[in-house]
Image (cartoon, rainbow, N blue to C red):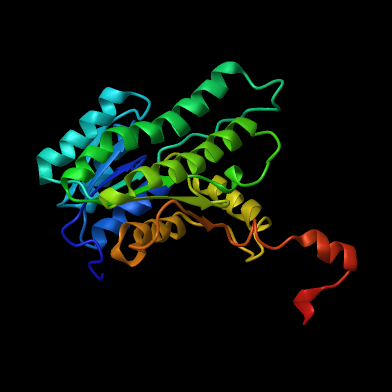
């Protein structure tokens, strides 16, 4: 523990499992007090209790403006300030192609992934202003950078997050509020309910997508969020931190064309 967030208060949506839970635990270990906001009213309180003193759970649906305002009010009432907002909550249900994707699925993806991030900024920024500045982080995705068949709505939602971060960063830079997002690659998480064997299968499947040869883990994204929340990133705003094991970097088609096996060098 290095206390990189000592004295700071962080609000993390989707904090009851996966990336959000890993981030809440890491932030707390670095000295932050953390408010975990999630719809999961059974797991969320357990995570907060397991973290211990300085962690609080609030049941909230990020699609609902009143819920979002309430979670910020709870953090402010508990600790008197908010310094970091991590708009992490998101969904990625099965979609099918753009012709066959149900309207209700498109609406769900848009409401959680776009509206939820927007509401987190809208109602969180006044708290950061009162604190004299701070850091807002959003979870985007490599799906916002490349086209992935079968999840067009998800790709569109994460592309919207990236664009929203860029625009908002320019609006609030003069107030000392930095706004960035993280674009994870394939991350093996259970969201608090997948059995271990399914997570292991996901981990093996994702490994094949990344040049680094492994799946991403929730802690990989949590560490990126810690960097963006801390003073170490004080000159960074409006950016997309891609944490994808090389997925969107090297283009393997060139090696296929030339027949070169660079692993044997």
Q: Residue at x 67, y 64 (%)?
A: 211
Residue 189 shown left or right of residue 100 in the figure: left
Quarter of the image containing the C terminus?
A: bottom right
Location of residue 86 in the rendering, given as x and y in whole percent from the top left corner: 34, 46
Looking at the image, the residue that sits furthest to the right is: 258
So how many labels did they put on this image? 0
Is residue 5 visible to the viewer in this orientation of the structure?
yes
Q: Quadrant of residue 111?
A: top left
Location of residue 177 in the rendering, given as x and y in whole percent from the top left corner: 29, 50
Quarter of the image containing the N terminus?
A: bottom left
Depth check: give the residue in front, 140 or 16. 140
Residue 93 shown left or right of residue 238 in the figure: right
Question: Eyeballing the image, is 115 above or below 26?
Answer: above
Depth check: give the residue in front, 48 or 241. 241
Looking at the image, the residue that sits furthest to the bottom is: 265
Q: Quadrant of residue 60?
A: top left
């Amino acid at each position: 523990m290095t206390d990189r967030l000592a004295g700071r208060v962080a609000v993390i949506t989707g904090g009851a499992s996966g990336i959000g839970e890993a981030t809440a635990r890491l932030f707390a270990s670095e000295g932050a007090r953390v408010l975990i906001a999630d719809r999961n009213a059974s797991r969320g309180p357990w995570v907060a209790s397991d973290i211990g003193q300085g962690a609080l759970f609030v049941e909230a649906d990020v699609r609902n403006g009143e819920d979002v305002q309430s979670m910020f009010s709870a953090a402010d009432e508990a600790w008197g300030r908010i310094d970091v907002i991590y708009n992490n909550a998101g969904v990625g249900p099965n979609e099918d192609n753009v012709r066959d994707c149900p309207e209700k699925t498109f609406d769900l993806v848009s409401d959680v992934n776009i509206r939820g991030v927007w509401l987190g900024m809208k109602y969180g920024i006044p708290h950061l202003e009162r604190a004299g500045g701070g850091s807002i982080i959003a979870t985007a995705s490599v799906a916002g950078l490349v086209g992935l068949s079968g999840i067009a709505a998800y790709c569109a939602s994460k592309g919207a997050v990236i664009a929203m971060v860029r625009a908002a960063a320019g609006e609030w830079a003069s107030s000392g509020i930095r706004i960035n997002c993280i674009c994870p690659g394939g991350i093996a998480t259970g969201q608090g309910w997948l059995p271990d064997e399914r997570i292991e299968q996901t981990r093996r499947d994702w490994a094949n997508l990344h040049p680094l040869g492994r799946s991403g883990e929730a802690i990989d994204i949590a560490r990126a969020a810690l960097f963006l929340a801390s003073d170490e990133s004080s000159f960074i705003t409006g950016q997309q931190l891609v944490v994808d094991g090389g997925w969107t970097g090297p283009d393997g088609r060139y090696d296929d064309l030339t027949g070169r096996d660079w692993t044997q060098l």
